[in-house]
Structure formats: structure tokens, C-alpha cells
């Protein structure tokens, strides 16, 4: 197979030649295969050529239908072949990964119409894989009906997992997608989570996650992963090197952040820490399995007691947040004092471990694991030295209480570890600018030197989109919305996507629609009831279904009549959780600077799910009383509608 799909001339700049070939693809090759030539697509191709030529960051804002995915895939692929290092395509979440690599997706189109043999491998997040230890626990301790299913899953595992033997061949397995019938709660009981200690797991060499990582790490051209996973790679790169482990991702030539407006959230999540008393106790007591000096044994007992006390204080200072599974923490003097005492004991243990290491009384591998774990905890707890620099909360109750800690800003670390590298970095999305400026996203990410451009969607929204704003008699009560949504769904005979701002809204709608007479005969699919890409596939194939979701504001690509109706249950303001509480607190105008931009970006994304091809038509409805009672908010929402489109007020009988 030829390295490049064009005759490469070593004396000329490679990117210039790649750009010329890509221009021919969009002007000649794809139109001959039945694709429509789009000026916006050609313009984007020339803009990305600049970014790859100069190895710079570029914010590529391109409306729905511009074909931006084909453009960045071609540049990423050719540059990977030129450098000998794979490109990374980071998507907002796992469902978007599946959208990109599905049989009718853009990668498949390039393979077919350009006769390209592309090595594409998926690097999914750890929580998308089965955990053998948790599967054992679920199979023995679950309710009978679930227990039977979990035992079936165990029996279906590859033979090398169930019956270790010499001379076996290994392959990846245990992907969430392989268990589409499990709902999210069932999957959480058997999937990897952050508190699984893989370093000491006796099954790690036969673990599906490990085998999958070995597979995609050898990718030659393109690795598709999530934003979360890429940021996890960035933050753990140095610590994994110290532990003698390979980085999560191999050295790569370029990065594309699809739905790039969500990168900051992923970075904050990845840089965060989670602490749990039970997990710490199990980890630290491993040291007692060796012959340790009495001073260390006493310290271990003291630090376990202090950890227990700290989590009691955390529980006492936790206050529930309405509509969130996170609890707000009151960082009072008592709590800060217990954190300091806990850190003092951890310092003392670290000093003792230096002596123990010199005496060689502890297993070297176990010692290194404990030292890394304590170092991680110290980094997290050090943020309490200046409470103004951290965001923290608790979740769960009793022995399951978890403390989550993250820094308030990640832009300094992103600037140092991501954007300081001489590498093309592409942020691609239909919504990157606010008021025509990219400074909001650039500043939040720490990007100082960048290219940018914005091109609109080529679709005729005036002819193809009907925007509706129901007029309420009871201020948009839940019952009113329920009746309005039913009327809209029946109008398109299903074929609807209902978007909710949070899980609580979705669950309430799910319960009400199951017994409401107006919903009789409608076929619903609810996010969380099965694996998400399986639900999306059913929604696309079973034309008259209704898909209800919380996470599909971005990236869902269902052209054709299966999606003819997008219903926004409520305006998608940011949640009332500690992360956004801090953002609001730091702002002089929290609604205008935090809530409103977030809502408008997400609303634009949700609107973009409707028209996915030139022939698509449909309804976009917003079920919010604010469109009628808050003129300033209405003005902002009107401004993000496609040019020429305006809301028609729908009177409800």
C-alpha cells in the first residue's frame, strides 16, 4: 500500500501537497461519488492547512452540514502517515465515538470512496470495560434475576479468562457495547471504577481493559478516544513514567477535539481526585503484611483513625443540593483542621517508608504503589491550604461517602502540558464562539496563540425548520409540558428526540409518560435503559420511536425522517452543583457570564440535532415559559436561531 494517496515530492512542503490533494478530493473525487460540494468545507480545508503547516492551535467553528469531520480526518490521517505517529481524535463522550466509527460514519465513507486503508482504533475510557473482580462480586451477591445474568456474562467470557493455561492467544473483550441490554445501573455494578486498584489485581493481565489498551496503543494512524481519556493521559503521563508504566496513549502527531467547547469540563474532571476512607484503609494496611518497624505500624493505626474521623466530619458538613447527586461542603475551621492533621500523619508515614525502603523489608512493588497513592492524596489535600483554589464536594452516604476535589482552574496546566507542544491541535464544533469572539474559550483553556475561523451551516433553515414556543396557561407547569410534548410527538408520529437538562427531569417524564393516556401507543427509548449507541441505532432504524436523553445535546447524527422533531424540555442552564456554584461566585455577573453562555451554547447544539442533511425537515420546540416572561433571555435565544428563523407561538387548547 502506498504511504500517501498522491505522488509525494520530497523537495516541496508536505502539508502544501496534502492540501492540494485534499482540495482535489472535495472539488472532484467526492462530487463524482455523489457528494455535494460545499464552499464552507473547502474554506475549512484551507484553514486547517495553515494550522498543520504552522503546528498551531485552531478553533474551527463550522455549522451543521459543513462536513467538518471529513476535513479534519483527512489532515489528521495524512499528517500521521508523514510523521509516523498516530493522530488522536478526542470526542466529547463514548456515544460520539461510536457515531464517528459506525458503518455509515465518516471514516467508513473515506475508506470506501477514496479507497483508503485506514488503521483506526478505539481508546475507550476505563469505565467502559468490564471489571472481573466486580463481576465476581455481582454474580455472588446480586439479586437472583441480576445474578443469573451476571453469571451468564461470566460464562460468555473468553476461555483464557475463565481457564488460564499456557500457549493461549489473547484478544480484547469486555467493552460496554458488547452488553447493550444492561441498563446503566447494572453496568456500574460490573464495570471498572476509580476505586479499583488494578496494580494489585491478579486478573490484570487477562483484563479486557488492559488488552484493549495494548491494542490501540499500537495504532499506526488514528486513535479515537474521549475527552476524558485524553485528559487522563495528560495528567497521569509523568506519574506513569515514574511507576515504570507506559502512558495511556502513545506519542502522537496531532489532536482533534471534536465538540471542543466541552474540553474544559473534561480537563477539570480528569485533574480531580476522589478519596474514600474504605479504599484508603485497604491500601495502607497492605504495609502491615510485611515485617515493618513498630513506629510505622503505630502511624498506620493513627492515620486510619484520622481518616475515619475526617470522613465523619465531611459527612457532618455535607449539605444536599437540590437536583444534584453532589453535596455541598462547608469548609469550616474544624474540617480544615482535620485535613491538616491527616496530611501531617501522611507526611510522617512517607518519611518512615524511606527507611523501610532502605531496609528492604517491604515488597518493592507494593511499596511503590502505596507511595504513589499517598502522593496523589497529598496533592489533592494540599489544595485545602488555600480553599479559594479548589472545588470540592461529597457524594454517597455512610461507608460509600466519597470526597471529590478539583482545582478551580486548569488553564495553567493545559497551557504547560498540552498547548506548549509544537503540534497541530484542532478544536472542532458548531459552537465555539460567544458573540462572534473566541476569547471566552481560549482564555478558559489557557490558549494564547491560536488561529480561528467560523463558517455557517449551508442548510436552508427557513424552509426546513419550524421553531415553536408553546404559550402556557399555567406558567409551563409539568402537566402542561407533558400535554404539549405529547401533542408535538403525535404530530410527527414519534420520530422525536426529547432533550432534558438533567436526570431528575428525565426520570420524572419517564414515570409520567408511562401512565399518561396521551402517550398511549408511543414507543419510547430512555437513556440509561441500555447502552447508548444501541439506543441510538434503534432510534434510527425503528422510525417511529421517541428517544429521551440527557447527554445527546451534542454529536447525535441521525439524518432522515427518524429524527423530525427536537423537543427541549427546559432551557439547559448549568446544573446547581459545586463546580458552577464556584464559577457563579467568582463572577460579577453570574447569570450573564456563566449561566447564559452555557445555556445558549447547549441550546444551539440541541437545535443542531434536527437538520442533518439538505433534505431534512422538522420541528424544533422549546418548552419554557421564559420565552414569554423574560424578554432579555428571549432576545438572546432569538439571536442564536438560524438566520431567517423565528419562533411561532403555539396555542395549546
Image (tube, grey):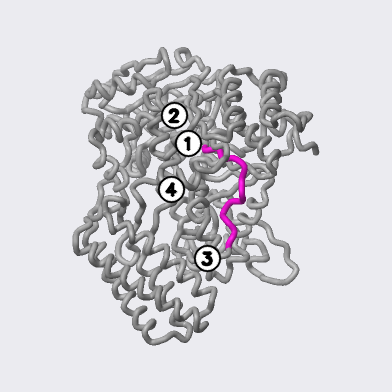
Q: Position of residue 150 (x, y in %)?
A: 53, 61
Neighbours of disc 1 within 10 Å: few (<14), some (14-19), many (20+): many
Q: Earlier in the sequence, mark 4 or mark 2?
A: 4
Mark 1 and mark 4 residues within 8 Å of each other at the beta carbon? no
Residues under labels 2 and 1: Cα distance? 9 Å
- Separation of marks 1 and 3 at Cα, in angstroms: 31 Å
Query: Of circles 3 and 4, which is in front?
Result: 4
* In the image, farthest residue toward the left: 333
Disc 4 marks which residue?
A: 413
Where 433 falls versus 578 (above or below)? above
Residue ID for mark 2: 431
Q: CA distance from mark 3 to mark 4?
A: 27 Å
Which is nearer the N-term, disc 2 or disc 1?
A: 1
Contact? badges 3 and 4 (CB < 8 Å) = no
Q: Residue furthest right?
A: 1
Q: In the rendered image, which residue does mark 3 sit on?
A: 198
Q: Residue at x 45, y 80 (%)?
A: 355
Q: Is residue 247 magenta?
A: yes
Horizontal side of 190 relative to 101 (left or right) equals left
Which tag, 1 or 3, sits closer to the chain's start?
3
Quarter placement of the N terminus: top right
Q: CA distance from mark 2 to mark 3?
A: 38 Å
Q: Residue at x 41, y 43 (%)?
A: 411
Would you say residue 603 sits in the magenta stretch?
Answer: no
Q: Earlier in the sequence, mark 2 or mark 3?
A: 3
- Determine crowd level at label 4: few under 14, some 14-19, many 20+ residues with C-alpha closer than 10 A: some
Q: Which residues are magenta?
A: 245-257
**Residues at marks 4 and 2 touching, judged by CB atoms closer than 8 Å:** no
Give the secondary structure at mark 3. helix
| Magenta-colored segment: predominant secondary structure | loop
Q: Which residue is mark 1?
A: 260
Amino acid at each position: 500500500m502506498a504511504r500517501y494517496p498522491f505522488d509525494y515530492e520530497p523537495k516541496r512542503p508536505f502539508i502544501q501537497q496534502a492540501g492540494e490533494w485534499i482540495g482535489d478530493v472535495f472539488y472532484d473525487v467526492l462530487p463524482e461519488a455523489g457528494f455535494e460540494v460545499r464552499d464552507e468545507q473547502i474554506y475549512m480545508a484551507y484553514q486547517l492547512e495553515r494550522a498543520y503547516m504552522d503546528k498551531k492551535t485552531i478553533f474551527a467553528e463550522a455549522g451543521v452540514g459543513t462536513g467538518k469531520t471529513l476535513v479534519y480526518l483527512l489532515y489528521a490521517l495524512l499528517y500521521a502517515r508523514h510523521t509516523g505517529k498516530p493522530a488522536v481524535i478526542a470526542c466529547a463522550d463514548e456515544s460520539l465515538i461510536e457515531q464517528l466509527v459506525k458503518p455509515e460514519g465518516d471514516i467508513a465513507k473515506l475508506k470506501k470512496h477514496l479507497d483508503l486503508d485506514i488503521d483506526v482504533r478505539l481508546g475507550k475510557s476505563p469505565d467502559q470495560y468490564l471489571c472481573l473482580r466486580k463481576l465476581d462480586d455481582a454474580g455472588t451477591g446480586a439479586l437472583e434475576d441480576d445474578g443469573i445474568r451476571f453469571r451468564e456474562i461470566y460464562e460468555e467470557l473468553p476461555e483464557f479468562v475463565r481457564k488460564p493455561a499456557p500457549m493461549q492467544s489473547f484478544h480484547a473483550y469486555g467493552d460496554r457495547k458488547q452488553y447493550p441490554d444492561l441498563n446503566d445501573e447494572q453496568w456500574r455494578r460490573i464495570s471498572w471504577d476509580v476505586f479499583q486498584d488494578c496494580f494489585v489485581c491478579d486478573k490484570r493481565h487477562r483484563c479486557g481493559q488492559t488488552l484493549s489498551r495494548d491494542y490501540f496503543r499500537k495504532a499506526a494512524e488514528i486513535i479515537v478516544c474521549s475527552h476524558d481519556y485524553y485528559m487522563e493521559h495528560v495528567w497521569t503521563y509523568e506519574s506513569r513514567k515514574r511507576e515504570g508504566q507506559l502512558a495511556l496513549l502513545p506519542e502522537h502527531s496531532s489532536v482533534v477535539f471534536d465538540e471542543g467547547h466541552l474540553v474544559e469540563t473534561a480537563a477539570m474532571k480528569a485533574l480531580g481526585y476522589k478519596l474514600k476512607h474504605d479504599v484508603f484503609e485497604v491500601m495502607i494496611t497492605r504495609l502491615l503484611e510485611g515485617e515493618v518497624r513498630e513506629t510505622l505500624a503505630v502511624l498506620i493505626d493513627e492515620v486510619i483513625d484520622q481518616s475515619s474521623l475526617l470522613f465523619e466530619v465531611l459527612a457532618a458538613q455535607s449539605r444536599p443540593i437540590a437536583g444534584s447527586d453532589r453535596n455541598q461542603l462547608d469548609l469550616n475551621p474544624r474540617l480544615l483542621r482535620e485535613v491538616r492533621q491527616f496530611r501531617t500523619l501522611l507526611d510522617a508515614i512517607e518519611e518512615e517508608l524511606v527507611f523501610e525502603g532502605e531496609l528492604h523489608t517491604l515488597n518493592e512493588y507494593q511499596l511503590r504503589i502505596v507511595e504513589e497513592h499517598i502522593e496523589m492524596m497529598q496533592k489533592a489535600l494540599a489544595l485545602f491550604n488555600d480553599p479559594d483554589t479548589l472545588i470540592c464536594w461529597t457524594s454517597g452516604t455512610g461507608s460509600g461517602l466519597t470526597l471529590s476535589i478539583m482545582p478551580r482552574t486548569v488553564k495553567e496546566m493545559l497551557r504547560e502540558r498540552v498547548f506548549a507542544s509544537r503540534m497541530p491541535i484542532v478544536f472542532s464544533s458548531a459552537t465555539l464562539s460567544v458573540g462572534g469572539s473566541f476569547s471566552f474559550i481560549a482564555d478558559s483553556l489557557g490558549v494564547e496563540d491560536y488561529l480561528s475561523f467560523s463558517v455557517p451551516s449551508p442548510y436552508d433553515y427557513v424552509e426546513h425548520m419550524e421553531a415553536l414556543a408553546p404559550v402556557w396557561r399555567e406558567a409551563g407547569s409539568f402537566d402542561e409540558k407533558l400535554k404539549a410534548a405529547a401533542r408535538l410527538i403525535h404530530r410527527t408520529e414519534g420520530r422525536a428526540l426529547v432533550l432534558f437538562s438533567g436526570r431528575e427531569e428525565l426520570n420524572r417524564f419517564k414515570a409520567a409518560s408511562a401512565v399518561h393516556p396521551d402517550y398511549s401507543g408511543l414507543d419510547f427509548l430512555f437513556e440509561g435503559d441500555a447502552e447508548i449507541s444501541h439506543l441510538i441505532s434503534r432510534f434510527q432504524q425503528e422510525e417511529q420511536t421517541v428517544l429521551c436523553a440527557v447527554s445527546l445535546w451534542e454529536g447525535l447524527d441521525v439524518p432522515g425522517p427518524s429524527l423530525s422533531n427536537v423537543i427541549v424540555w427546559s432551557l439547559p442552564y448549568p446544573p446547581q452543583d459545586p463546580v458552577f456554584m464556584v464559577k457563579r461566585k467568582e463572577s460579577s455577573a453570574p447569570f450573564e457570564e456563566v449561566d447564559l453562555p452555557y445555556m445558549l451554547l447547549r441550546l444551539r447544539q440541541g437545535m443542531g440535532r434536527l437538520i442533518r442533511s439538505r433534505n431534512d425537515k422538522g420541528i424544533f420546540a422549546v418548552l419554557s415559559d421564559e420565552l414569554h416572561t423574560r424578554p432579555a433571555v428571549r432576545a438572546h435565544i432569538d439571536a442564536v436561531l438560524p438566520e431567517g428563523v423565528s419562533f411561532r407561538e403555539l396555542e395549546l387548547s
